Every structure is written in C-alpha cells, then in structure tokens.
Image (cartoon, rainbow, N blue to C red):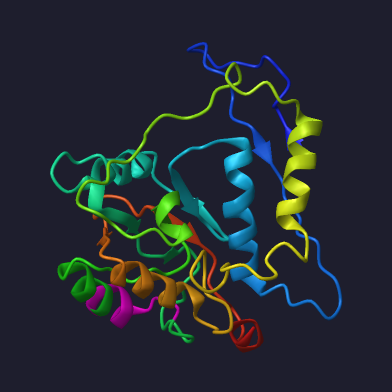
C-alpha cells in the first residue's frame, strides 16, 4: 500500500511530504519466510522502487525516536569529510521507559551497551543490534568498501519518477514474492543472513569483514530511541 505518492501535499517550506509505504510479504506454506531477516531483505529490495535514499533507519514496532537531534547527529558521521565514506552504519543503544527498579529481566543490557559495544566501537567496528541503527543502503547488498568509494546523497523526486502508485505497487510485488529469492544470493552474500537466530549480529560482523567501519554512538543529553521492555517472563521468552 502506497500513500501520498500521487498528491501535491507539501510542508510549510514547500517540500513534498514523504511517501508512506506499508509492505506485506507474500508467505506460503513450505516456503520459509526467514522471519525478521526475510522482512528486512524484502524491504531493502522494495525501497529503491520508491526512493533511492542512501540511508535506512531500522526500528522495531515497539521503539520510537526520542530526540529530534538524532537524525542530524547520525548524518554527521556519514557526511564527515575525512572518514564518512567508510562508515557503514551508526548504532545507538536501546533504552526503555518501563524498566522496574530491580530490572528483573535484565532488559537494560548493561554489559552489552556499556562494555561490549563500546569496546567494539573503539576498534572501528561496532556490533549491529538490528534496531536503533542508521545504515547505508549499499552495504546491505554485499558491497565491499573501496578507497575510491564516494557515497551518493541525491534522491529521487516526484518530478524525476513519473510512475503512479499502481505502477509502483506492481513493480514491488515481484520483489516480495515467495519465489523471488530462489537461486539468488539473498540471505547468503546479500542482505541479512538466513539460518541463524542472531542475524543482526552476524551481518554486522560480515559488514566489518568487508572493510567497512561503524560507529557506536550513545548521546548523553537525551536518549535517542525509547521502547517498551518485557514485563513478564512469558513475554521475555518470546
């Protein structure tokens, strides 16, 4: 479902409002959909049909942006004149607004966010947590970093792409079909890796092996992202 593509709605500065896209993958019995990794890979393929925006923000449904400065701060790393071209992603820590005093289910992840991620980040390769992360679209498609690489910051506009919403929907259907990935490198060398429960950590390590650098950024003035932690043991197990 695509909303806002064929309208002339603009903001106070005269800029066209963003397009809102809701995507549901085709799922059939006997064909694995690969859970979150499969959903992410489908989104990576579909999003270029709507926009060639170079940065992707990955958020789960129970998280929200808590600081208006977060996007600008992340872009400062990507657009840095000296090191920005080598940065694959900027990972923020996760914070929750319903943690109990004793944190019965260890939802704060103190060891991970205050020691492990800081240590990896200090070596130029922060772990990817699968959420609260700004990523360059290109490095999720199996691209290796090269010294001559220069990111492209231009994006499509309505005037450049004349396709209407129905045409975009048709172009996207094939990309989310249950048979599209058969015989391809998706889930192996392209996109998030299949066949492992922690696909986010593994793809972060794979990106690092492709000579990209990454940033772990924990702003102190205001937490970047907030969410809801498990409140029962049953929910924690899920």
Q: What stretch is highlighted in magenta?
A: 107-115
Res. 182 visible in picture: yes
Percent x, y of residue 101: 41, 78
Left of 145 or right of it: where is 21? right
Going 19% across and 66% down the picture, which residue do you hit?
124
Left of 215 or right of it: where is 31? right
> For residue 195, what is the image quadrant?
bottom right
Going 21% across and 68% down the picture, which residue do you hit?
121
Is the magenta region chiefly helix, strand or loop?
Answer: helix
- Along the line of sight, the residue nearer the viewer: 13 or 123: 123
Q: Residue furthest right?
A: 29
Q: Which residue lies furthest to the left in this view?
A: 82
Left of 170 or right of it: where is 155? left
Percent x, y of residue 131: 47, 63
In the displayed structure, 206 sits above or below 151; it is below
How many numbered tags mark residues here? 0
In the displayed structure, 160 sits above or below 202; it is above
Going 59% across and 24% down the picture, which residue do you hit?
17
Percent x, y of residue 153: 37, 33
Please check the rendered image and state whether residue 130 is part of the magenta-colored stretch, yes or no.
Answer: no
Indicate the quadrant containing the N terminus: top left, top right, bottom left or bottom right: top right
In the displayed structure, 34 sits above or below 225; it is below
Left of 165 or right of it: where is 233? left
Res. 132 visible in picture: no
Indicate the quadrant containing the C terminus: top left, top right, bottom left or bottom right: bottom right
Percent x, y of residue 113: 30, 73
Going 31% across and 46% down the picture, which residue do you hit?
74
Q: Residue furthest front?
A: 183
């Amino acid at each position: 479902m695509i909303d806002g593509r064929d309208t002339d709605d603009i903001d106070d500065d005269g800029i066209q409002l963003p397009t809102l896209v809701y995507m549901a993958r085709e799922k059939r019995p006997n064909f694995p959909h690969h859970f979150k990794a499969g959903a992410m890979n489908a989104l990576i393929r579909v999003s270029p049909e709507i926009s060639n925006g170079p940065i992707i923000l990955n958020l789960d449904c129970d998280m929200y942006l808590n600081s208006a400065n977060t996007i600008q701060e992340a872009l400062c790393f990507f657009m840095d004149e000296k090191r920005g071209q080598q940065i694959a992603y900027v990972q923020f820590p996760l914070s929750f607004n319903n943690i109990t005093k004793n944190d019965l289910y260890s939802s704060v992840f103190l060891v991970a966010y205050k020691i492990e991620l800081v240590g990896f980040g200090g070596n130029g390769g922060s772990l990817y947590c699968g959420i609260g992360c700004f990523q360059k679209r290109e490095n999720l498609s199996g691209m290796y970093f090269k010294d001559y690489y220069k990111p492209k910051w231009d994006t499509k506009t309505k005037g450049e792409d004349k396709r209407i919403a129905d045409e975009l929907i048709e172009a996207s259907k094939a990309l989310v079909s249950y048979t599209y990935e058969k015989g391809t490198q998706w889930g192996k060398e392209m996109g998030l890796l299949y066949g492992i429960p922690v696909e986010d950590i593994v793809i972060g390590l794979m990106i690092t092996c492709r000579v990209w650098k990454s940033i772990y950024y924990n702003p102190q003035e205001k937490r970047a992202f907030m969410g809801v932690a498990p409140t029962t043991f049953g929910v924690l197990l899920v």
